Image (spheres, helix red, strand yellow):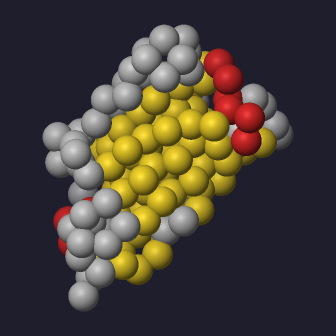
Amino acid sequence: QVQLVESGGGLVQPGGSLRLSCVASGFTLDFYAIGWFRQAPGKEREGVSCISSNVDSTPYADSVKGRFTISRDNAKNTVYLQMNSLKPEDTAVYYCAAVRLGGVCYLNEYEYDYWGQGTQVTVSS
């Protein structure tokens, strides 16, 4: 059974950091692009970052450039999103998603086949 499970969310003060993890089971991530998306209350889901299977492509949304870093550890079947200098506007449910794709990745949710259940990130003082 294909499954993605996010973890690492929580409540953090502005300026703080969190590291989200996305662990895959039922398949190996080696040949998959992974995307991180988020959805704030009342807003559409938006692409945050993604990482291609060969790590050649790691685009970021303008709103998180310089603050967030995506990485992957295929040996652990896990993709990470390191989030630094968090702002209240980063508050959202964060989702990871997977698609079997080589060499590229896209910040378009409709490109992805498998989704996790999400993890809540709240940035507030």
Q: Is residue 41 visible?
A: no
Q: Is residue 84 left or right of residue 23?
A: left
In front: 111, or 58?
58
Q: Is residue 34 visible?
A: yes
Residue farthest along the left direction in this orientation: 62
In front: 99, or 8?
8
The image shows residue 42 at horizontal and vertical percentages of 25, 64
Q: Is residue 71 left or right of residue 40?
A: right
| Quadrant (top left, top right, bottom left, bottom right) of the N terminus | top right
Q: Is residue 110 left or right of residue 5?
A: left
Task: Tell me the quarter of the picture where residue 16 sits.
Answer: bottom left
Task: Tell me the quarter of the picture where residue 53 sits.
Answer: top right
| Quadrant (top left, top right, bottom left, bottom right) of the C terminus | bottom left
The image shows residue 100 at horizontal and vertical percentages of 61, 19
Q: Identify which residue is drawn at 24% across, 57% down.
A: 43
The image shows residue 76 at horizontal and vertical percentages of 73, 41
Q: Is residue 24 left or right of residue 84?
A: right
Q: Identify which residue is drawn at 60% across, 24% down.
A: 32
